Amino acid sequence: MKLNVEQREFVEELLEKMTLEEKVGQLNLDSPSIVGGFDVPFEELIEMVTDGRMSQEEFGKIMATAERDFHEDDIRAGMVGAIMGNDPVKANELQKIAVEETRLGIPLLMGFDVIHGLRSVYPIAIAEAGSFDDDLMERTAKMAAKESRAYGINWNFAPMLDVARDSRWGRVSEGPGEDPYLASNFARAKIKGLQNNTESTENYVAACTKHYVAYSACEAGRDYNTTSMSTSQLYNVYLPPFKAAMEEGACSAMASFNDLNGVPCTVNSYTLRDILKDKFGLEGFVVSDANGIRECVTHGVAEDDGDAGIKALNAGLDMDMGTRIFYNHIAQAVKDGKILMETLDDAVRRILSVKVWLGLFENPYVSKAVIDEYAKALPKEHKDLCLEAAEKSIVLLKNENGILPLGKERKFTLVGELADRADEVVGAWSLGWEIDDCVSVKQGLEEAGAQFEYYPVCGPESDIDENELRAAIESDSEIVIAVVGEYKSMSGEASSKADITLPGNQQKMLKKLVAAGKQVIAVLMNGRPLALGWEAENLPAIIEGWHLGIQMGNAIAKVMFGECNPSGKLSSTFSSVNGQEPMYYNHPNTGRPGSKSKFTSKYLDAPVEPCFPFGFGLSYTTFEYSNLKVDENGDEISVSVMLKNAGNYDGTEVAQLYMQDVTASLVRPVKELKGYKRVTLKKGESSRIDFTLRKCDMGFYDNQGKYTLEDGLFRIYVGGNSKDVLDTEISVSFRNGEVK
Ligand code: NOJ
């Protein structure tokens, strides 16, 4: 986001005209309140969901048809700067009130959670990041932006940039995995896709990077839990994707719920002002997460709402999501001298700047033509892109004796309730999908002309249906495809789990099928890395299908029959058993790295190694790496390797470059991803892959938050995942930090 001189002047002139109350109104993000349309009081409904009398699904259906109050009178009174929603007709009505019926005619920001697509839902972020395809990540964001705008949304609460190392945390599904380098590339691609397509205002939205910051480091992976860490860890692991997003000009950020070293991020002037605004240069604004300001009272760092509001605004939080604390308390606080007018002006200026940059003052509306166009069936380009993203995100975890791909004439039995759940393919935080657009795995296989009988047998929460199990066992096909995993409600917000093995009776079902002599191929549908020790040991093939979005079924069918050769890799490490979490590849070295000997860093009852390492993913062909060479080239290190497609299929490999700073003033990770390339090779073909590692990217942040480059020995690794790599060493001098 960059404003030109006229735009800046426009903002200043507007600011001059505003009353104190009008300024405070801009800081208020409202959401429509639910006012009725159901048989019992709203509070009772919430109780029913909490105590299990009503499922999340039923609750969602009731909410979708509930009557809402969009606070039209408050908008008219200038009390609202932004509102949530995804209905273009309603959005036009509300914008009209803001533009035509308020004194200064300031349009509204219309915010919504478009995390991995709105109607055109593509794979959840943890899956899409595993495509290692930056261009794809940008194109899906572009599609989401355009579609959002057609639904009246001009501000997306995305991308989610939490680097997540603990798979118990439910929100791992929403972010780009465990690696700061991959997450930073994801951040850049998403900001470009959402914000930089500026030929027409109908194409772009303001991004909201979240959750700032270190939300994913919640202790023990329990959502909203406390977070504490060194400055160096904050800078090296959790801040990089936010820094990258700010370099791309991200318009806004959302402060996270957690406290960081005792200071809730909502009132944390060190992270908000010193780092995000002053150091990283955010020109737009920071919004709280829902109810975040009030929760500072519960955290115990503010006495009451007013105190929390004053602390938040003074710390650099500009907009209040959902509590109206700013609206109710800030004007008085300014009069009492507890907030300087220049602090308030700074917040308002930032919000107005985003509105100006979005072109809302020229045209805040969605045209009727666009509304009509999007009310029709999904355009083919959207379906195609969702399919491409789904195909590239699939990770082949195991394929013993080349059991996959299957020939189309090969009969099999399909089991698992999830196989027939078109409503589950979209994953957590998907809010605009339509069931008719969604392709289940069963549908995908049927449409591909597969020969199979289907018995659901069991799902993530059900008992095994013994009759169906018997039928599956008695069927004459030796091969069973089992679609197993998690419901979409089992990951995402407030969905942390202490047990991340296959939920319910699904593993029991697999065991019975294996015991009956079936060749069981698991297709996983899940929102987090699962602990797959038993499955990896006992099943001949495993396809990681995540929640791949509306085209999931078609993508799985294409992989199953070899029309698509899998190329996705894991953006997160998979454990074998629960107790290994948090497990991540780029951990600091210990003095006693885990090994067979007793006094080393390990558990007595779990392997040292993960089940599947970061970056792992098989193909139907095999790739061979050889001839790793490293050269110093001025301010760069050139790395080259030969890659050969040594198998029987054409295929695409994600070649990965890692480094290790062998000796440094702080303990450094055993490996750090520093580059990757998607390379497509015909069978038998070889190619030289070149990477450039800039010396200026080989440093790290110390405990003062200062970036340092330290001369010495570096180990360089290249391979198809973080574990199976070639390696060599090079001594590097940074000329006293003068490298560019
Ligand atoms: C709470 C979630 O933490 C955040 O990710 C989301 O954007 C907001 N609610 C708004 O729905």
Image: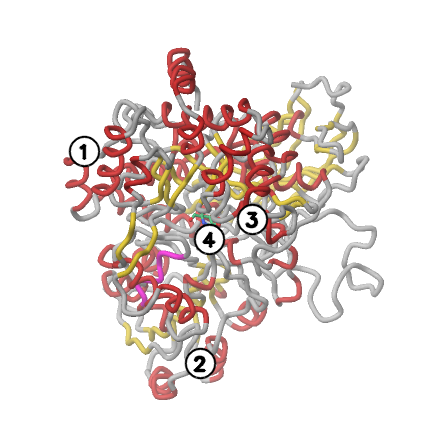
Q: Can residue 149 be seen by looking at this rendering?
A: yes
Give the residue number, with chain letter if any, for mark 1: 367
**Label 2 residue SS:** helix
Q: Nearer the viewer, mark 3 or mark 1?
A: 3
- The answer to whether 171 appears left or right of 637 in the picture is left
Pointer 4 or 1: first along the chain? 1
Q: Amino acid at mark 1?
A: Ser
Q: Nearer the viewer, residue 494 or 191?
A: 494
Decide: is 562 above or below 706: below
Give the residue number, with chain letter if any, for mark 4: 619
Pointer 2 or 4: first along the chain? 2
Q: Nearer the viewer, mark 4 or mark 1?
A: 1
**Residue at image coords 83%, 65%:** 598
Quarter-of-image position of residue 466: bottom left
Where's residue 445, x and y in %? 28, 64
Q: Are marks 3 and 1 in contact (CB under 8 Å)?
A: no
How far is the residue under mark 4 from the one under mark 3?
40 Å
How far is the residue under mark 1 from the one under mark 2?
55 Å
Q: Which mark is residue 633?
A: none
Q: Is mark 3 within 8 Å of ligand 1?
A: yes
**Badge 4: how crowded within 10 Å, few (<14), some, or many (20+)?**
many
Please provide the residue range marked out in magenta: 421-427
Q: Nearer the viewer, mark 4 or mark 3?
A: 3
Pointer 1 or 2: first along the chain? 1
Q: Amino acid at mark 4?
A: Ser
Give the residue number, with chain letter if any, for mark 3: 257
- The answer to whether 739 appears left or right of 416 in the picture is right
| The C terminus, quarter of image | top right
Q: Amino acid at mark 2?
A: Leu
Q: State how many labels appear.
A: 4
Where's residue 395, x and y in %? 46, 55
